[in-house]
Image (cartoon, rainbow, N blue to C red):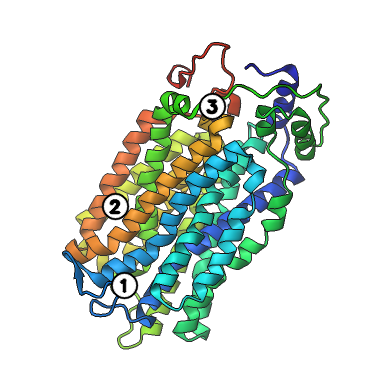
Amino acid sequence: MAKSNDDGDLLRALDQAKTGKFHVKTIFTAGMGFFSDAYDLFVTSTAIPIIVAVFGITNSNNIFGTSSIGPLGAASVETGMIGAMALFGAFVGAIVFGRIADLKGRRYIYGLEMTILLVFAIVSAFSINIPMLMISRFILGIGVGGDYPVSSTIMSEYSSVRNRGKMVLSVFSMQGFGLLFGSLIGLVSIHFLPLDYAWRVMLGFGAVPAASVIYLRRRIKESPRYSIEMGDRAGAAAAVQAATGKKVSVTADRVKARKMSPSQFMRNYWVILLGTAGSWFLFDMAFYGTSINSGQILSEIGYGAVAGNLKATIFNIAVGNALLAGVFAVPGYWLAVGLVDRVGRKKLQWIGFTAMAIVYFIFALKFTTISRDLMLFVALYGLSYLFGNMGPNSTTFLIPTELFPTEFRTTGHGISASSGKLGAGIFTFMIPVIEALYGLPTVLGALTLIAITGTVLTLLTIKETKNRSLEETSLAIKPPSSSLNPGSKL
């Protein structure tokens, strides 16, 4: 169904709005969720070595009651599972919350995901055994995953055309500060507390940033674009006025627009979905696999090791994680914010994947030489963070909010985000296993192939969306006929 003049006036008011207090508040409200998400996911890179030590996880003492599982050491499998459980939970959360937000509304569930995260961050901190820790981290991950499609879509649907990329990535870039803050909390906890308390403080502190935005999320108005799609023109007008300060007069509410069925959506958007979900899957395999296991990777090259002093060794690894986050990861996010509306989404994504492939290939080819030079190792390893965050880590989050129609926007984003978290969970689990079986150079060779595949997939399936309205990029404005062929217009 074509948009009415009233709908067009409302959408133009959003698309042409200047950045104001409402947008800044929304960036904070959504962004603190990603601060919390990143904190909870990445603090485990510092906490896992402590958990392994405190619970005495070895091949002779583990939850499986056996020294090996096939060719794998039981300790490596258990360690990988601890790191991956939140990511597998995020896989579930992104799909479930993404679909609900399209069926019931963005505001309907906004804040619930942070409540889940808050509660189970605390529960995980009081875990009395490894199974309890794994279960609580999995449920926490459901909250983390649920935040991805809802926060990104709310910010995208409220943003202007000119600054949409910058606004959405300002939300996502809070992930960098969460990653850094997790490393700093780890440093303080390890320095001042016994190890059995230190990891509990690290995990439990994730509840604090989550608590700061639950109230604000429950107070936010429904997205105007979703309200228009549902026929609530008056609600959309009120939300537009709150966002822009401009009052748009509208006539009576119209009948709801005719929706696509899920089968129509998949039939007409499967190539786009392959691109958004596939590139996110590939990127998160590399990014989360190396980030969450960075402590183990640093240990592999002997960084920070203090013979006979576990606490000093773990503290030094936490310093290394903090330096990687502060010097490379955080700047990468904000480079993306500055470049995305000028350079474009597609270009940033394939450049980032290609740069990562080059760095991983150098590592795999010259690992022995590089591992003997600590500064060179950290610099190259950090560059993979920098280019990853500047490119595909940011763009895979943004692009799904722009390429899918309003009635399937959070669904498409949720599927894409869940694919990413599935890839992240698989490779976070597999890195300790592959490293134990074949060594770190093999891990880096696999990462090279993953990044190259990401470049190819981006070039073949992703369409540029900068400086275009959501209605144009997602083909939500359709002719009266049933033609929904995205390939012909993007």
Q: If you read the primary sequence from the N terminus, does the residue marked by circle 1 or circle 3 appear first? A: 1
* Tag in front: 1 or 3: 3
- Res 40 seen here: yes
Residue 239 in which image quadrant: top right
Crowdedness near tag 1: few (<14), some (14–19) or many (≥20) residues, C-alpha within 10 Å: some
The residue identified by callout 3 is 474
Q: Residue extending furthest bottom?
A: 308
Q: Please say whether residue 179 is visible from this viewpoint.
A: no
Question: In the picture, residue 382 is in which quadrant?
Answer: bottom left
- Residue that mark 1 sits on: 299
Residue at 58% in and 11% down: 480
- The amino acid beneath tag 2 is Tyr
Where's residue 250, x and y in %? 81, 24
> To which residue does mark 2 refer?
360
- Identify the secondary structure beneath mark 2: helix
Check disc 3 and report its element: helix, strand or loop: loop
Residue 421 % position (x, y): 42, 51
